[in-house]
Amino acid sequence: MTDAISSMRPVLAVDRLSIAVGAKPQRRVVDEVSFSMGSGEIVGLVGESGSGKTMIGRALLRLLPPAAAVVDGHVTFDGVQLSSLNDAQMRGLRGRRIGAVFQEPMASLNPAITVGAQITEGLILHDGLTPADARRKALRMLEKVKIADPDDIFQAYPHQCSGGMRQRIMLASVLALRPALLIADEPTTALDALIRKEVMDLMAALASEIGTAVLLISHDLAMVAQYADKVVVLRGGQVVEQGPTSEILLRPQAEYTRALIGALPARHTAAAGAPPAKAALVEIENLCVDFKRRSMGFGRAARRVRAVEDATLDIRRGEVLAVVGESGSGKTTIGRALLRLCGTAAGAMRFDGADVGEFQGRALADYRGRTQMVFQDPFSSLDPRMKLGELVAEPLRRTGVSRDERRARARQVLEEVGLAGDYAERYPHELSGGQRQRVCIARAVISRPEFIVADEPVSALDVTVQHQVLGLLAQLQRTYGFSYLFISHDLGVVEQIADRVVVMYRGRILELGSRDAIYDRPQHPYTQRLLEATPRIVRREAGGFELTLSRPARIAPPAGYAFFNHGSMPGAALSQGEPVMVEIAAGHSVCCIAR
């Protein structure tokens, strides 16, 4: 932070803020929290789930839920205590002077109103612009946030945009009003590495240009270390320590902060660096999957979109094969196709030597008993009307196991995943996000499957819960010996857990190899871009931590070939010719075209 910033009156000053929930006796979820922010400054608010981060952000907007209330302290914004303002004055501040970007943009955007109408609404209401002037300003902001077709997106509805695009639309909507303070609550949690970097670079650049102070609420410590000027670490609603990012995250003094950073994913030497010498359990050959996109209007025929194109890979017994790539690359589609949850257009899938496409009736039921899936959102995949013991025991209903034995095994597996005691009698809504994910894992392993598809199983968890869940997955795999298809956009998690890695982009496999080969010797330019977009905090031998950014050396393609490119990668045109996977080393292949 510059001397100029530090000498100015803070844009935001939080003084001994306390928030309580419930009736008497009240429980404090935020307890005497104090910090301040200057113009153009980015302050990271970090801590585990339940530490009070989001409560503080909502308190700044005076949008606390009905059960919560500020019971002590005060918030000063631009020299004015927010508690002294009436509702009409607060409405004048929200959006105009204090903007907010929330974790899930689809929940923040009205699905029944076009993108353009939602961006121009604030400009007309707060800045008094005419609809024509508001449209011009909105289009300029859409260009600034790197929307390729601003005119088309202006007329589109939120559901017609990708997750990363929706987040950029939210940024455009908020920053168009040039607020003095931006509250960004987990703005990149569900985004892949490249989109995350684009959104954060954009937020930092626009905040610097406009002079907006940014309160960055996140559990991504490496991202906070890369972008924040200061950090406030919370635990149980109290400040553990705060100060410059380089001091707090790279040279932490508090034991809790050191534990948070120590829980970050890291490569373990015990993890396999080369493919296990075991027979293939799952084989995919030239797999193609199409989706039918609905008609966009009267008289316009629906069209088919290819989600997976000529994918070929295998998964060995006891192996963790990770699939990485940006949203829409086909990662989840491969997993769902393998479990016969969606149809295929071409290619073959084999499980233990048998053709998966030929399974019918009892054979299909048996196959689904030998395979399981852990879904990305645990809450939506658990029936809210069933108790946990019933949910976990459900896969055993077709096995002929008695009801009493099903209950006993459900309790045993719940205990194995750290949910012993009366958890079998609880309902999903009574659990935290990490506990619900443990229930999904327990349900997946109770039938002793040979193969599990884990779809983003830790994407929405904070670092300590993520660390516990990853340890649990490794422990269960050692116990039961199943194979994983591990789908993730978090390259740090993949580096810790994977034996081999598949890199996908727009439905096509671009690179496949051992974990060490992909991370240490990436070949395809897209793989290198993914790694470059992923900051990491690593422990130094001399003590403390450092923020590292991957800088892979640019590598020439194999002789007689060029790297395949879809035409959207910087500095390269669309490849012409038939893509082929070229083996450049034992077990390491890259997608190329013949020159």
Image (cartoon, helix red, strand yellow):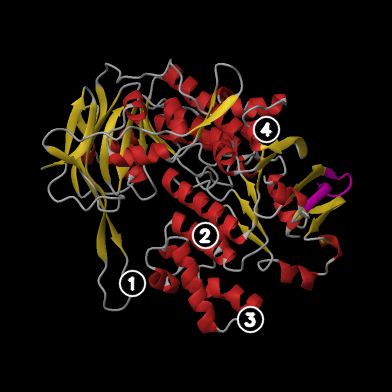
Task: Measure the C-alpha gap from mark 3 to mark 4.
Answer: 43 Å
The amino acid at mark 2 is Met
Which SS class for mark 3? loop
Part of the protein shown in magenta:
13-27
Measure how far apart labels 3 and 1 are at the Cα level: 34 Å
Q: Give the mark, 2 or 4, whose residue is nearer the N terminus.
A: 2
User: Foreground mark, 2 or 3?
Assistant: 3
| Crowd tier of the residue under label 2, counting other residues whose Cα lies within 10 Å: few below 14, some 14–19, many 20 or above | some
Residue type at mark 1 is Met
Instruction: Tell me how far mark 2 sits from mark 3, CA to CA.
Output: 27 Å
Callout 1 secondary element: loop
- Residue at figure coordinates x 10%, y 43% from the top left: 595
- Mark 2 vs mark 3: which is more N-terminal? 2
23 falls in the magenta region: yes
Callout 1–callout 2 Cβ contact below 8 Å: no
Label 4 Cα neighbours within 10 Å, binned few <14 / some 14-19 / many ≥20: many
Circle 3: residue type: Gly
Residue marked by disc 3: 128
- Mark with earlier residue (3, 4): 3
Looking at the picture, does residue 52 appear above or below residue 292?
above
Which residue was labeled with disc 1? 296
Query: Which residue occupies the foreground of this view, 208 or 423?
Result: 208
Q: Are marks 3 and 4 in contact (CB under 8 Å)?
A: no
Q: Residues within 10 Å of mark 1 (few under 14, many from 20)?
A: few
Secondary element under disc 2, as helix, strand or loop, is: helix
For disc 4, the marked residue is 248
Q: Position of residue 397 (x, y in %)?
A: 45, 34
Residue with the mark numbered 2: 106
Q: Position of residue 59 (x, y in %)?
A: 75, 55
Residue at 16% of width from left, 43% of height from top?
A: 579
